[in-house]
Protein backbone atom coordinates (compact mmCIF):
# COMPACT_ATOMS: atom_id res chain seq x y z
CA UNK A 1 0.00 0.00 0.00
CA UNK A 2 2.73 2.49 1.04
CA UNK A 3 4.81 1.70 -2.06
CA UNK A 4 2.41 3.50 -4.42
CA UNK A 5 2.38 7.22 -3.71
CA UNK A 6 -0.87 9.15 -3.96
CA UNK A 7 -0.76 12.40 -5.94
CA UNK A 8 -1.79 15.41 -3.88
CA UNK A 9 -2.75 18.87 -5.08
CA UNK A 10 -2.48 21.96 -2.88
CA UNK A 11 -5.12 24.65 -3.41
CA UNK A 12 -3.98 27.95 -1.94
CA UNK A 13 -0.34 26.91 -2.22
CA UNK A 14 1.15 30.40 -1.97
CA UNK A 15 -0.38 31.32 1.43
CA UNK A 16 1.15 30.54 4.80
CA UNK A 17 -0.84 27.32 5.36
CA UNK A 18 -0.24 26.25 1.76
CA UNK A 19 3.48 26.80 2.27
CA UNK A 20 3.35 24.68 5.41
CA UNK A 21 1.58 21.93 3.47
CA UNK A 22 4.45 22.00 0.97
CA UNK A 23 7.14 21.63 3.63
CA UNK A 24 5.26 18.76 5.29
CA UNK A 25 4.58 16.87 2.06
CA UNK A 26 8.11 17.15 0.65
CA UNK A 27 9.42 13.58 0.90
CA UNK A 28 6.20 12.26 2.48
CA UNK A 29 6.03 8.44 2.49
CA UNK A 30 2.40 8.29 1.27
CA UNK A 31 1.86 11.45 -0.77
CA UNK A 32 3.51 13.19 -3.71
CA UNK A 33 2.89 16.86 -4.59
CA UNK A 34 1.67 16.76 -8.17
CA UNK A 35 -0.01 20.15 -8.70
CA UNK A 36 -0.10 23.58 -7.04
CA UNK A 37 -2.88 26.13 -7.42
CA UNK A 38 -3.60 29.62 -6.14
CA UNK A 39 -5.26 32.87 -7.19
CA UNK A 40 -5.25 34.15 -10.79
CA UNK A 41 -2.41 36.58 -10.00
CA UNK A 42 -0.10 33.63 -9.28
CA UNK A 43 -1.32 31.40 -12.09
CA UNK A 44 1.21 30.72 -14.84
CA UNK A 45 4.22 31.54 -12.70
CA UNK A 46 6.82 29.15 -11.34
CA UNK A 47 6.14 28.53 -7.67
CA UNK A 48 9.39 30.19 -6.60
CA UNK A 49 8.34 33.30 -8.55
CA UNK A 50 4.80 33.27 -7.18
CA UNK A 51 6.04 33.34 -3.57
CA UNK A 52 9.02 35.60 -4.22
CA UNK A 53 9.66 37.58 -1.00
CA UNK A 54 6.53 36.02 0.47
CA UNK A 55 7.97 32.66 1.56
CA UNK A 56 7.25 32.56 5.31
CA UNK A 57 8.72 29.24 6.40
CA UNK A 58 12.05 29.01 8.22
CA UNK A 59 13.26 26.26 5.88
CA UNK A 60 13.88 26.97 2.16
CA UNK A 61 11.40 26.16 -0.58
CA UNK A 62 11.74 22.43 -1.36
CA UNK A 63 13.60 21.88 -4.61
CA UNK A 64 10.87 19.59 -5.95
CA UNK A 65 8.31 22.42 -6.14
CA UNK A 66 10.44 25.46 -7.04
CA UNK A 67 9.89 25.14 -10.77
CA UNK A 68 6.35 23.78 -10.68
CA UNK A 69 3.87 26.00 -12.54
CA UNK A 70 1.07 27.37 -10.39
CA UNK A 71 -2.47 26.91 -11.76
CA UNK A 72 -5.58 28.96 -11.21
CA UNK A 73 -7.53 27.28 -8.39
CA UNK A 74 -10.80 27.86 -10.24
CA UNK A 75 -9.66 25.56 -13.07
CA UNK A 76 -11.14 22.56 -11.29
CA UNK A 77 -11.15 20.08 -14.18
CA UNK A 78 -7.52 20.80 -15.09
CA UNK A 79 -6.25 20.47 -11.52
CA UNK A 80 -8.24 17.37 -10.60
CA UNK A 81 -6.93 15.68 -13.72
CA UNK A 82 -3.44 16.00 -12.24
CA UNK A 83 -3.99 14.62 -8.74
CA UNK A 84 -5.82 12.00 -6.69
CA UNK A 85 -6.94 14.37 -3.90
CA UNK A 86 -6.39 17.96 -2.79
CA UNK A 87 -5.54 19.93 0.32
CA UNK A 88 -7.49 23.19 0.45
CA UNK A 89 -6.10 26.28 2.13
CA UNK A 90 -7.67 28.82 -0.20
CA UNK A 91 -9.04 32.26 0.62
CA UNK A 92 -11.51 33.90 -1.75
CA UNK A 93 -12.98 37.41 -1.98
CA UNK A 94 -16.50 36.00 -1.77
CA UNK A 95 -15.80 34.42 1.61
CA UNK A 96 -17.10 31.15 2.98
CA UNK A 97 -19.93 30.57 0.52
CA UNK A 98 -17.60 30.91 -2.46
CA UNK A 99 -15.03 28.59 -0.88
CA UNK A 100 -17.76 26.05 -0.08
CA UNK A 101 -18.88 26.05 -3.72
CA UNK A 102 -15.31 25.58 -4.91
CA UNK A 103 -14.56 22.73 -2.50
CA UNK A 104 -17.79 20.96 -3.44
CA UNK A 105 -16.91 21.42 -7.12
CA UNK A 106 -13.63 19.61 -6.48
CA UNK A 107 -15.38 16.83 -4.56
CA UNK A 108 -17.91 16.36 -7.37
CA UNK A 109 -15.06 15.48 -9.75
CA UNK A 110 -14.52 12.41 -7.50
CA UNK A 111 -11.57 14.14 -5.83
CA UNK A 112 -11.40 14.00 -2.02
CA UNK A 113 -10.84 17.40 -0.39
CA UNK A 114 -8.98 17.80 2.91
CA UNK A 115 -9.74 21.37 3.90
CA UNK A 116 -8.08 23.79 6.26
CA UNK A 117 -10.81 26.40 5.67
CA UNK A 118 -13.87 26.96 7.85
CA UNK A 119 -16.35 27.06 4.95
CA UNK A 120 -17.75 23.53 5.39
CA UNK A 121 -17.18 22.98 9.11
CA UNK A 122 -20.83 23.56 10.01
CA UNK A 123 -22.23 21.03 7.51
CA UNK A 124 -23.63 18.04 9.41
CA UNK A 125 -22.29 15.36 7.05
CA UNK A 126 -18.76 16.82 6.80
CA UNK A 127 -16.38 15.30 9.37
CA UNK A 128 -14.29 17.84 11.30
CA UNK A 129 -11.36 15.77 12.44
CA UNK A 130 -8.88 15.78 15.26
CA UNK A 131 -7.68 12.34 14.24
CA UNK A 132 -6.92 11.03 17.74
CA UNK A 133 -10.31 12.10 19.09
CA UNK A 134 -13.11 11.57 16.58
CA UNK A 135 -11.83 9.29 13.83
CA UNK A 136 -15.21 7.49 13.99
CA UNK A 137 -16.76 10.55 12.33
CA UNK A 138 -15.37 9.43 8.98
CA UNK A 139 -18.36 7.08 8.92
CA UNK A 140 -20.51 10.08 7.90
CA UNK A 141 -18.64 10.40 4.61
CA UNK A 142 -20.88 7.81 2.91
CA UNK A 143 -23.94 9.99 3.61
CA UNK A 144 -22.10 13.04 2.29
CA UNK A 145 -21.27 11.19 -0.93
CA UNK A 146 -24.95 10.48 -1.44
CA UNK A 147 -25.77 14.17 -1.00
CA UNK A 148 -23.05 15.22 -3.43
CA UNK A 149 -23.82 12.42 -5.88
CA UNK A 150 -20.27 11.07 -5.79
CA UNK A 151 -18.61 7.69 -5.45
CA UNK A 152 -15.20 8.73 -4.14
CA UNK A 153 -15.35 12.52 -3.81
CA UNK A 154 -15.97 14.10 -0.40
CA UNK A 155 -14.85 16.89 1.93
CA UNK A 156 -13.22 16.44 5.32
CA UNK A 157 -12.14 19.44 7.37
CA UNK A 158 -9.94 20.21 10.33
CA UNK A 159 -11.22 22.39 13.18
CA UNK A 160 -10.06 25.81 14.26
CA UNK A 161 -6.40 25.86 15.26
CA UNK A 162 -6.95 27.25 18.77
CA UNK A 163 -9.23 24.51 20.10
CA UNK A 164 -6.48 21.93 19.79
CA UNK A 165 -4.68 23.57 22.70
CA UNK A 166 -7.39 22.41 25.12
CA UNK A 167 -9.90 19.98 23.55
CA UNK A 168 -7.45 17.01 23.69
CA UNK A 169 -7.04 17.42 27.47
CA UNK A 170 -10.77 17.79 28.07
CA UNK A 171 -11.77 14.79 25.95
CA UNK A 172 -10.76 11.96 28.33
CA UNK A 173 -12.41 13.84 31.20
CA UNK A 174 -15.84 13.95 29.57
CA UNK A 175 -16.79 10.62 31.12
CA UNK A 176 -16.74 12.32 34.53
CA UNK A 177 -19.38 14.81 33.41
CA UNK A 178 -17.83 18.19 32.68
CA UNK A 179 -20.36 20.95 33.30
CA UNK A 180 -18.56 24.18 32.46
CA UNK A 181 -15.31 25.25 30.83
CA UNK A 182 -13.78 28.72 30.74
CA UNK A 183 -10.85 29.15 28.36
CA UNK A 184 -8.67 32.06 27.33
CA UNK A 185 -6.41 31.49 24.33
CA UNK A 186 -3.22 33.43 23.63
CA UNK A 187 -2.75 33.08 19.89
CA UNK A 188 0.32 33.55 17.70
CA UNK A 189 0.43 35.98 14.79
CA UNK A 190 0.90 33.13 12.28
CA UNK A 191 -2.74 32.33 13.05
CA UNK A 192 -3.47 35.48 11.07
CA UNK A 193 -1.00 34.33 8.36
CA UNK A 194 1.39 37.09 9.41
CA UNK A 195 5.04 37.47 10.35
CA UNK A 196 6.52 40.30 12.41
CA UNK A 197 7.98 41.81 9.23
CA UNK A 198 4.47 42.08 7.84
CA UNK A 199 2.82 43.10 11.11
CA UNK A 200 5.23 45.31 13.08
CA UNK A 201 2.29 46.72 15.05
CA UNK A 202 2.18 43.42 16.95
CA UNK A 203 5.67 43.90 18.40
CA UNK A 204 5.31 44.78 22.10
CA UNK A 205 1.55 44.58 21.74
CA UNK A 206 -1.48 42.45 22.68
CA UNK A 207 -4.84 42.66 20.90
CA UNK A 208 -7.80 41.45 23.02
CA UNK A 209 -9.98 40.42 20.09
CA UNK A 210 -9.72 38.02 17.13
CA UNK A 211 -12.73 38.10 14.84
CA UNK A 212 -14.81 34.90 14.89
CA UNK A 213 -12.44 32.98 17.16
CA UNK A 214 -14.55 32.97 20.29
CA UNK A 215 -17.58 31.54 18.52
CA UNK A 216 -15.42 28.79 16.97
CA UNK A 217 -13.78 28.06 20.33
CA UNK A 218 -17.16 27.56 21.98
CA UNK A 219 -19.05 25.71 19.22
CA UNK A 220 -16.55 23.56 17.33
CA UNK A 221 -15.72 21.28 20.30
CA UNK A 222 -19.41 20.33 20.36
CA UNK A 223 -19.10 18.87 16.86
CA UNK A 224 -15.83 17.14 17.71
CA UNK A 225 -17.55 15.45 20.68
CA UNK A 226 -20.76 14.67 18.76
CA UNK A 227 -21.97 11.32 17.42
CA UNK A 228 -22.80 10.07 13.94
CA UNK A 229 -26.52 9.30 13.69
CA UNK A 230 -28.74 8.88 10.62
CA UNK A 231 -26.06 10.15 8.24
CA UNK A 232 -25.30 13.30 10.23
CA UNK A 233 -23.08 14.38 13.07
CA UNK A 234 -25.23 15.33 16.04
CA UNK A 235 -23.36 17.88 18.13
CA UNK A 236 -22.82 17.30 21.82
CA UNK A 237 -24.90 19.53 24.10
CA UNK A 238 -22.44 19.75 27.00
CA UNK A 239 -20.24 21.00 28.49
CA UNK A 240 -20.86 24.73 28.25
CA UNK A 241 -17.77 26.57 27.02
CA UNK A 242 -17.10 30.30 27.23
CA UNK A 243 -13.93 31.81 25.82
CA UNK A 244 -11.80 34.85 25.17
CA UNK A 245 -9.25 34.84 22.33
CA UNK A 246 -6.28 37.17 22.45
CA UNK A 247 -3.58 37.88 19.85
CA UNK A 248 -0.09 37.96 21.39
CA UNK A 249 3.36 38.81 19.96
CA UNK A 250 4.48 35.23 19.31
CA UNK A 251 5.46 33.73 15.94
CA UNK A 252 3.86 30.27 16.33
CA UNK A 253 1.93 28.44 19.03
CA UNK A 254 -1.47 28.92 20.68
CA UNK A 255 -1.55 28.69 24.47
CA UNK A 256 -4.72 28.22 26.52
CA UNK A 257 -5.59 28.88 30.16
CA UNK A 258 -8.41 26.47 31.02
CA UNK A 259 -10.81 26.25 33.97
CA UNK A 260 -13.02 23.16 34.41
CA UNK A 261 -16.06 22.46 36.59
CA UNK A 262 -17.62 18.98 36.85
CA UNK A 263 -21.30 18.16 37.28
CA UNK A 264 -20.55 16.59 40.67
CA UNK A 265 -17.54 18.15 42.34
CA UNK A 266 -17.64 15.49 45.04
CA UNK A 267 -16.96 12.76 42.49
CA UNK A 268 -14.44 14.52 40.31
CA UNK A 269 -11.29 12.65 39.21
CA UNK A 270 -8.14 13.11 41.26
CA UNK A 271 -5.15 14.93 39.82
CA UNK A 272 -3.34 11.60 39.57
CA UNK A 273 -6.26 10.09 37.62
CA UNK A 274 -6.28 13.01 35.19
CA UNK A 275 -2.54 12.79 34.60
CA UNK A 276 -2.86 9.06 33.97
CA UNK A 277 -5.66 9.64 31.45
CA UNK A 278 -3.59 12.23 29.64
CA UNK A 279 -0.51 10.04 29.55
CA UNK A 280 -2.41 7.04 28.20
CA UNK A 281 -4.57 8.96 25.72
CA UNK A 282 -4.01 7.79 22.17
CA UNK A 283 -6.08 7.28 19.05
CA UNK A 284 -5.97 5.60 15.68
CA UNK A 285 -3.00 7.68 14.47
CA UNK A 286 -0.85 6.16 17.22
CA UNK A 287 -2.30 2.67 16.78
CA UNK A 288 -1.70 2.81 13.01
CA UNK A 289 1.70 4.51 13.49
CA UNK A 290 0.84 7.18 10.94
CA UNK A 291 3.82 9.21 9.68
CA UNK A 292 2.66 12.54 11.15
CA UNK A 293 1.34 11.14 14.44
CA UNK A 294 3.17 12.03 17.66
CA UNK A 295 4.23 8.98 19.63
CA UNK A 296 2.93 10.65 22.80
CA UNK A 297 -0.21 12.64 22.03
CA UNK A 298 -0.28 14.72 25.26
CA UNK A 299 2.91 15.69 27.08
CA UNK A 300 2.58 16.91 30.66
CA UNK A 301 5.19 19.17 32.24
CA UNK A 302 5.68 19.08 36.01
CA UNK A 303 7.52 22.41 36.09
CA UNK A 304 5.44 25.39 37.18
CA UNK A 305 6.71 27.50 34.27
CA UNK A 306 5.88 25.04 31.47
CA UNK A 307 4.66 24.57 28.83
CA UNK A 308 6.22 27.62 27.22
CA UNK A 309 5.36 28.58 23.66
CA UNK A 310 8.92 29.03 22.42
CA UNK A 311 10.29 25.95 24.16
CA UNK A 312 7.47 23.45 23.72
CA UNK A 313 5.53 24.12 20.51
CA UNK A 314 7.83 21.83 18.48
CA UNK A 315 7.66 18.74 20.71
CA UNK A 316 8.88 15.35 19.49
CA UNK A 317 11.94 16.09 17.37
CA UNK A 318 10.65 19.39 16.05
CA UNK A 319 7.56 17.89 14.41
CA UNK A 320 5.16 20.08 16.38
CA UNK A 321 2.26 17.61 16.29
CA UNK A 322 2.08 16.79 20.01
CA UNK A 323 -0.07 18.68 22.53
CA UNK A 324 1.45 19.86 25.80
CA UNK A 325 -0.10 20.61 29.18
CA UNK A 326 1.00 21.86 32.55
CA UNK A 327 0.02 23.52 35.84
CA UNK A 328 -2.85 21.13 36.55
CA UNK A 329 -4.16 22.03 39.98
CA UNK A 330 -7.35 22.36 41.96
CA UNK A 331 -8.97 25.78 42.10
CA UNK A 332 -8.34 27.07 45.64
CA UNK A 333 -11.21 29.55 45.29
CA UNK A 334 -13.62 26.67 44.72
CA UNK A 335 -15.25 28.41 41.75
CA UNK A 336 -13.98 25.66 39.45
CA UNK A 337 -12.66 22.18 40.16
CA UNK A 338 -9.41 22.31 38.18
CA UNK A 339 -7.36 24.64 36.05
CA UNK A 340 -4.47 23.95 33.67
CA UNK A 341 -2.45 25.29 30.74
CA UNK A 342 -2.47 23.80 27.23
CA UNK A 343 -0.34 24.47 24.16
CA UNK A 344 -0.37 23.44 20.51
CA UNK A 345 1.51 24.52 17.38
CA UNK A 346 -1.10 26.36 15.35
CA UNK A 347 0.28 25.93 11.82
CA UNK A 348 1.38 22.34 12.39
CA UNK A 349 -1.07 20.47 14.64
CA UNK A 350 -3.65 23.25 14.26
CA UNK A 351 -3.52 23.69 10.49
CA UNK A 352 -1.51 21.95 7.78
CA UNK A 353 -0.09 19.20 9.99
CA UNK A 354 -3.55 18.30 11.26
CA UNK A 355 -4.75 18.17 7.66
CA UNK A 356 -1.91 15.89 6.61
CA UNK A 357 -2.59 13.60 9.59
CA UNK A 358 -6.29 13.42 8.63
CA UNK A 359 -5.30 12.57 5.05
CA UNK A 360 -2.99 9.82 6.29
CA UNK A 361 -5.84 8.34 8.34
CA UNK A 362 -8.29 8.55 5.44
CA UNK A 363 -5.72 6.95 3.14
CA UNK A 364 -5.14 4.04 5.51
CA UNK A 365 -8.91 3.65 5.87
CA UNK A 366 -9.34 3.42 2.09
CA UNK A 367 -11.09 6.77 1.52
CA UNK A 368 -8.17 8.21 -0.47
CA UNK A 369 -6.70 6.14 -3.29
CA UNK A 370 -5.27 6.34 -6.80
CA UNK A 371 -7.87 7.40 -9.33
Image (cartoon, helix red, strand yellow):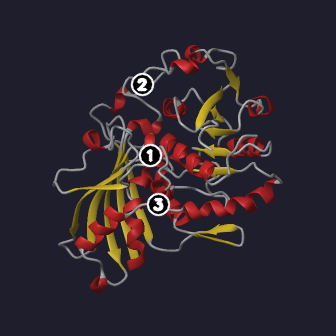
Identify the residue at horizontal 52%, vertical 18% (top origin): 63
Task: Indicate whether 58 appears above or below 108.
Answer: above
Badges 3 and 2: C-beta atoms under 8 Å apart? no
Q: Quadrant of the N terminus?
A: top right
Q: Which residue is mark 3?
A: 283
Category of crowding for the residue at label 2, using alpha-carbon neighbours closer than 10 angstroms: few (below 14), some (14–19), many (at least 20): few
Q: Nearer the viewer, mark 2 or mark 1?
A: 1
Q: Nearer the viewer, mark 1 or mark 3?
A: 3
Q: Which residue is mark 1?
A: 349
Identify the residue at horizontal 49%, vertical 33% (top origin): 20
Q: Using residue 5 as the reference point, say whether residue 259 is left or right of it.
A: left
Name which of mark 2 and mark 1 comes first in the sequence.
2
Q: Nearer the viewer, mark 3 or mark 2?
A: 3
Q: Using residue 263 as the reference point, say whether residue 117 is left or right of it.
A: right
**Residue in the foreground of this view, choosing between 247 and 6:** 6
Q: Using residue 291 as the reference point, say whether residue 58 is left or right of it.
A: left
Q: Residue 180: percent from the left, percent from the top? A: 39, 72
Specify the label residue 217 is tagged with: none
Specify the label residue 198 is tagged with: 2
* Dot 3: element: loop
* Structural distance between the alpha carbons of marks 3 and 2: 38 Å
**Residue in the foreground of this view, choosing between 89 and 214:** 89
* Dot 2: element: loop
Task: Indicate whether 12 appears above or below 152.
Answer: above
**Residue 177 visible to an observer of this rendering:** no
Identify the residue at horizontal 62%, vertical 15% (top origin): 46
Total count of labels: 3
Q: Residue 118: percent from the left, percent from the top? A: 59, 48
**Residue 302 visible to an observer of this rendering:** yes
Amino acid sequence: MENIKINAGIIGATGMVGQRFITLLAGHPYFNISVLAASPRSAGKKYSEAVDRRWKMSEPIPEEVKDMIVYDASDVEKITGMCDFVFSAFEMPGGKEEIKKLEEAYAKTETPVISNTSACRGIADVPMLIAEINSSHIDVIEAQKKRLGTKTGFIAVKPNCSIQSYVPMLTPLLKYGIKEVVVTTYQAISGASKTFDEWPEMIDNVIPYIGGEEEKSEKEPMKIWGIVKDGKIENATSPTITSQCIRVPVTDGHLAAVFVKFEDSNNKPSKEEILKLWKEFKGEPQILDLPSAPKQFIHYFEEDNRPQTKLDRDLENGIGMAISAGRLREDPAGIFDYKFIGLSHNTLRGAAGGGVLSAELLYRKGFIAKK
